[in-house]
Amino acid sequence: MTYKIAPSILNADFSNLRKEVEAAENGGADFLHLDVIDGLFAPSISFGPAVIESIRKHSNLIFDVHLMIQNPDRYIPDFVKAGADIISVHAEGNHHLHRLVSQIKDHGKKVCVALNPATPIDSIKHLIVEVDMILLMTVNPGFGGQPFINSVLPKISELRQLIESKNLSVDIEVDGGIMPKEAKLCKDAGANVFVVGSYIYRHSEVEEKRKAISEIRKAFSI
Ligand code: DX5
Ligand code: ZN
């Protein structure tokens, strides 16, 4: 199993976005987690394809685009064009989820289905063979800097058992409130991709950001 760190720029300094993205890359990140929020699916409004396209040419990171928007099928081509490598869509609110997953794969991109904290694993058990990753929200969507929801931990283990029972190599991404302690708990439960936002971007200094990334990596390597 390979472990990956995905800094989320939701709490980054948007007036310095290129530098913030470079700091993540130079700090040893694997993915860049890009939270697209429309203010309808989840509260707060973040950014769209144009911002992603503007940073795409300045980064070699894998762009992990997390769509917290209503009717994401309308915008898949735009996010593909903007440079997304992985597109995550929520199980909640998407009545034709299999069709949406197929649409992303038809564009040649990796596909991930995201579940809010209260949504059971059962909701995606018939889709698990179709996806590259499952994102388990460990906060309620909409904002960075929220506390980790411990009750998601057994859900991580349940999902890892489901994946192993079918001999699949599906990544489990955890997203929200992840700091070193939570990264270790989630790793022990079966997660292998860690979205980290404010723990990294609460620092203004590049060196501090780099240290935060290495603390997370150390936490799940022990
Ligand atoms: C919340 C987003 C998360 C969030 C993570 O809706 O999906 O990716 O930005 O930020 P932290 O690590 O600060 O909880
Ligand atoms: Zn996210």
Image (cartoon, helix red, strand yellow):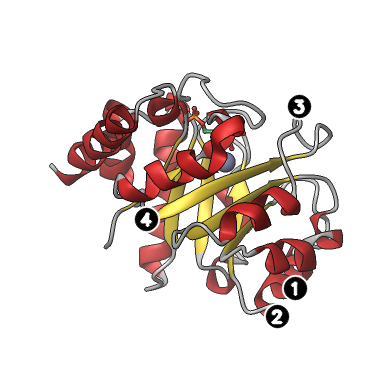
Q: Which residue is mark 2?
A: 106
Is 57 above or below relative to 122? Answer: below
Task: State the quadrant of the C terminus.
Answer: top left
Mark 2 and mark 3 lie on one chain; the one further toward the N terminus is: 3
Residue at the (45%, 24%) spot, across then down: 148
Q: Which residue is mark 4?
A: 30
Mark 4 and mark 3 lie on one chain; the one further toward the N terminus is: 4
Residue 170 vs residue 100: left or right?
A: left
Closer to the camera: disc 1 or disc 4?
A: 4
Residue at the (56%, 66%) spot, across then down: 85
Mark 1 and mark 3 lie on one chain; the one further toward the N terminus is: 3
Gap between marks 1 and 3 measured at Cα = 26 Å
Q: Which residue is mark 3?
A: 43
Residue type at mark 4 is Asp
Q: Position of residue 71 (x, y in %)?
A: 85, 53
Front position in the image: 147 or 10 = 10
Closer to the camera: disc 2 or disc 4?
A: 4
Residue type at mark 3 is Pro
> Which mark, by number, is residue 129?
none
Q: Is mark 4 within 8 Å of ligand 1?
A: no
Q: Which residue is mark 1?
A: 103
Gap between marks 2 and 4 measured at Cα = 24 Å
